[in-house]
Image (cartoon, coloured by chain):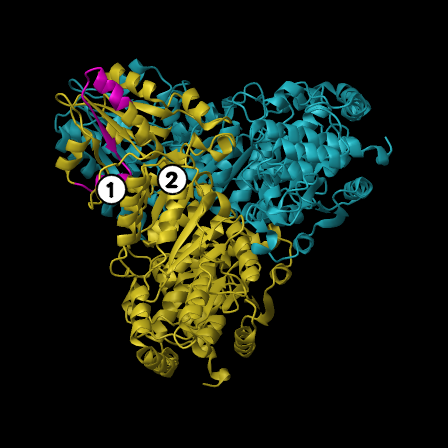
Chain colours: A cyan, B yellow
Amino acid sequence: MPLHETRPLANAIRFLAIDAIVRAGEGHQGVPLGMAEIATALFTQHLKFNPADPQWPDRDRFVLSNGHGSMLLYALLHLTGYPHFGIEELRSFRQMGSRCEGHPEFDTAAGIEVTTGPLGQGIANALGMAVAEAYLNAKFGDGIVNHHTYAFVGDGCLQEGVGQEMIALAGHLQLGKLILCWDDNRITDDGSTTLSISEDVSARFRVAGWHVIEADGHDLDALAAALAEANRDPRPSMIACRTVIARGIARLQGQRGGHSGKLFEADADAARNELGWPHAPFEIPPDVLDAWRGAGHRSDAEYLAWRERLAALPADARAEFERIQAGRLPDGWQRVLEDYKRQSIERGEAQAGIMISAEINDRLAQLPERMVACADLEAPTSHKRSLHAFTAQERSGAYVHCGVREHLMGSMANGMAAHGGVIPLAVTYLAFADYERPAMRMAALMGLPVKFVFSHDSIGVGRNGPTHQPVEILASLRAMPNMRVFRPADAVEAAECWALAYEHQSGPSTMVFARQNLPLVRTSHGAENRCARGGYVLAAAEGGQRLVTLLATGSEVALALEARERLQRKGIPTAVVSLPCWELFDAQDRAYRDEVLGLNTVRVGVEAAVRFGWDRYLGERGGFVGMAGFGASGPAEVLYEHFGITPGHIVAEAQRHL
Amino acid sequence: MPLHETRPLANAIRFLAIDAIVRAGEGHQGVPLGMAEIATALFTQHLKFNPADPQWPDRDRFVLSNGHGSMLLYALLHLTGYPHFGIEELRSFRQMGSRCEGHPEFDTAAGIEVTTGPLGQGIANALGMAVAEAYLNAKFGDGIVNHHTYAFVGDGCLQEGVGQEMIALAGHLQLGKLILCWDDNRITDDGSTTLSISEDVSARFRVAGWHVIEADGHDLDALAAALAEANRDPRPSMIACRTVIARGIARLQGQRGGHSGKLFEADADAARNELGWPHAPFEIPPDVLDAWRGAGHRSDAEYLAWRERLAALPADARAEFERIQAGRLPDGWQRVLEDYKRQSIERGEAQAGIMISAEINDRLAQLPERMVACADLEAPTSHKRSLHAFTAQERSGAYVHCGVREHLMGSMANGMAAHGGVIPLAVTYLAFADYERPAMRMAALMGLPVKFVFSHDSIGVGRNGPTHQPVEILASLRAMPNMRVFRPADAVEAAECWALAYEHQSGPSTMVFARQNLPLVRTSHGAENRCARGGYVLAAAEGGQRLVTLLATGSEVALALEARERLQRKGIPTAVVSLPCWELFDAQDRAYRDEVLGLNTVRVGVEAAVRFGWDRYLGERGGFVGMAGFGASGPAEVLYEHFGITPGHIVAEAQRHL
């Protein structure tokens, strides 16, 4: 369609947004009204997509990073013909149960690539999608994986640190198929952007190695040309689109209130006059709807050609592509882990916790879909090993040097998982999990199978001192819904926990490892994955009815075993329970949990961390040996003594409660 | 002293660092060896300080943002004569109990301005110190407050998002007395910086409005000149110091291992030969020590002149300055809060939680030392009111528009508190506490009296949906040592909690408020601050022995009261306990806690958040009414019904457990 005919298309977006927001009584009109032309140019002339197959693996990805402008996305999904977004859905915007939620919620089957709202996350996710695309492109070739990732972005996303981290790393990695459209409307929630930013945003992108184009955000010709130029350039591109926030609402446009000031029917009426849109609320005239539905078919030929290319692949390559797209692990993949368990028991040696994890993952080389990201801690976390780096020049590398950018690393991993076809691991120290936490929350909320891997998990860090010693972070992550936190006690548990993490598809797993040596606590052979129930009796009470139950995780399981020996010698039948994953344990039936916890015994929790959260297992008579506050700087073994996390103190705590 | 004589001064730093690290068996030599000349230039020619009075209010602030290089700071404090850093202290580097901890730990009395280690925090703290200086300068004039803030910074701090946020806001606010010295050694932990960064760092600073100078980081003349130029320029300055990491250790310098590769005695011996330093370990020749001690006296005249100017102030201005420096609240300051409590009871109206907090703070205008920072949510959090903005032009403003930069906001607040003379509040939505959390942890670790204020504290947020609805964040903050979390139920509790927060000097307070209306639950007059004990019986059981105890916080207290009415009508004597601050409650004696909790009653916790952490109060027979996972998008009242957080469900839960 000639460009001069596209103004009604943009206005169709505008009025769907206005009508839905007036009907809901609230919403954010700034973005859909300000970016309507940008969206029109992208969706009618550039985006490769297929509403009839929203999960087409080689579709372009579209991320609305300024997610509060959700009605823009819903309007586009409706207009282009995504089946989940009928007009009734739009009429129920912001009502309980509507797909048109306040912010877009991840649902690729419906056409929503990622949940957005917390600012900066979306563009960082987009970077992850572009990394996944480049990696898969290197593996499967242009015929199978070759798409762009587009993100719309406002000032807020670019002010956030994670957004700045994204700019730096995307420029460094020269992700040329990543294209941002910046809604340069010069308004934030507080008013003029001059309240909080003075820098030339375009120049900041250029410094980072981006290709920057400036365009009138309401000029369809200019926007289409800019997108074409961005597509041609080998660098990541940022199109600075000068826009008027809430354009079309005379009372609010270009002003602070344009962001989300309440819209009334009178505003909608005035906009109808102003923009020449005589149609009733939620009514799109047939010619406009036809044009939009036509846009929904713009990639049909490309889609069919892609399916033919996929069908023409050699059978094994096609099977491999379909396997990783489905997130299915290869047959027999677990054998490596079983071998590792057996060999660990035969070796019988203590090993540093994080090195155990590194070795396990190194052995899983038959999972080529696995990518590892790390925040400048390659040597102490050791998860690179036989991998090579993913760089601007070499896209086949599965290891991403993220720099000291933990937040971006986590959000990037989310984008990789949302893209599909890769399994992302993100590695850093547990003390820095807080930097990554906003991304971890989004992974939990979206149910993305990201593996967040952490080393240096307690005061066992030693002399680097309290800044580097997590004491409260295990609790803070266990508090997060849909997040599984694994803290294995030795090499055998580590293999079992990694098996569970790789199998878990509906949410993230947090893998927590000690820096220090973990002696072997699971010394008997057996194929059963005992960690699958989250907690189990590792050493039963002997010589009579169980009187004491010691509950421990990770590096403290060995201390509990030693305390049990001493209690047994005193004639006190004592069991040790290992609790590597609370979430899995809590999902067991009551009888199993009661049996493991030893309901009528004295229970003592042991963990080099705060007690917070442990009470659910300890009961009113329960004791605890752990940390009461932050750590200190000193050798690890001295710190364990200093803070009283020793077999002697465990024995004393049990006896005190008997 | 002529510059050509200063090389031994720099080498004194080097060998103290080498000797301490060799003795400890570990440490990070990269920074002290690479920045020895920069530190020498700053401390011998520019820094305004007085080792005999480390807390001199008008001293220049020095922040080692790359805190792993802690031996640089300890060496400087020793050489310039800070009394807490005798040579024995340096010999015990990284031993338990030493002041020379792995990373510098906040202790202004000893000369350590702020705890550093987690990257990016230090330079963000430095921004806060510069803001505090500018604000106090506007209030008290150049004669009393007029100092620089210097920070040493490595590549890691600048890669972190919080560092990037800092660059943007410092440039925007044109904090001309803020000077960074960048250790441009082109090495990070993973190796060459080219692994993860391609941008021209100096250009990135220039884009943000900084004055950038490039200098040879080992040339004392050039460094001294650069510092002088930075001092003259009205913009914030960044001195890009080209350095060689670990300079002096031939085996490691300029290489990846320079960062923290193990040093041996042979390395120390080789360095002694190489640098012409024939002295024994930890021995500083008298002339060099005299020169350094002389540097420690370089500001003596300025110090005395400053004391004279302070003494010459009018009595009331001097008293005011001394009051805010001591962190002492003015006599009778609480009267406003007591009036507010009384008036709230008289009005008897429900009010939006966050607006209650805003009104309370607006009335506390007699605390001119209070500064409020907010991350682009001025309107919905309303804590600006009668304050005006702190800007590049107007330094008397007490409200800092931070932009959408929560992490920087929190770290900035820490720097303001560490500086002294101001009481910082940092305001955003509770859902975004995760962005700020690394700063909150540092405040807790340092024991800084920052007030972290949050609005929109639950599913009561409503239609913005689960991204904006905290459910796990209260638990995650309660898990943090030395962090007090307040969640008041109404205007009266809010006034009491704010009184407690302002009085609390030895750690941060988190203040959590609902977006929605809070009806009055405390309707009887009384001067006693009932929240001071953290939890208390708000409504006693009537008509017999208490059978049920409903424990609630914040917006759910009103629901618990309504449930109590229904239970009482059924003949079940029921008490309601309000628990606005768990940390204060846990500090009460056992008898009080048992009495409040009603040990032998059925206890039901009620909070629109996850149960995690509640078990400590609920006992093995306890029930809970709250959230089991993330929220949803819908009107608040519909969500409360949907998730079953209603008086009816509370009644049912109590009866189920009876």
Residue B315: image x %, image y %? 29, 75
At label 2, the amino acid type is: Ile
- CA–CA distance between discs 1 and 2? 28 Å
Task: Look at discs 1 and 2 and give the one toward the viewer.
Answer: 1
Q: Is A520 included in the stretch rendered in magenta?
A: no
Question: Which residue does the numbered mark 1 point to in the structure image?
Answer: B531
Q: Is residue A514 visible?
A: no
Chain letter of the residue carrying label 2: A
**Residue ID at (70%, 42%):** A181
Where does the image place residue B305, in percent across and percent down from the top left? 36, 82
| Residue lying furthest bottom | B2
Q: Position of residue A44 (x, y in %)?
A: 78, 31
Residue ID for mark 2: A473
The reply to whether callout 1 and callout 2 are in contact (CB within 8 Å) is no
Of the 4 image quadrants, the one containing the N terminus of chain B is bottom left
Q: What's drawn in magenta, residue-wise?
A: B563-588
SS at mark 2? Answer: helix
- Same subunit: marks 1 and 2: no
Residue lying at the far right of the rendered structure: A2
For label 1, the crowd category at 10 Å Cα-Cα, with few meaning under 14, some 14 to 19 and many 20 or more, is: many
The correct choice, above or below, for A124 with respect to A202 in the image is above
- Rendered image quadrant of residue A91: top right
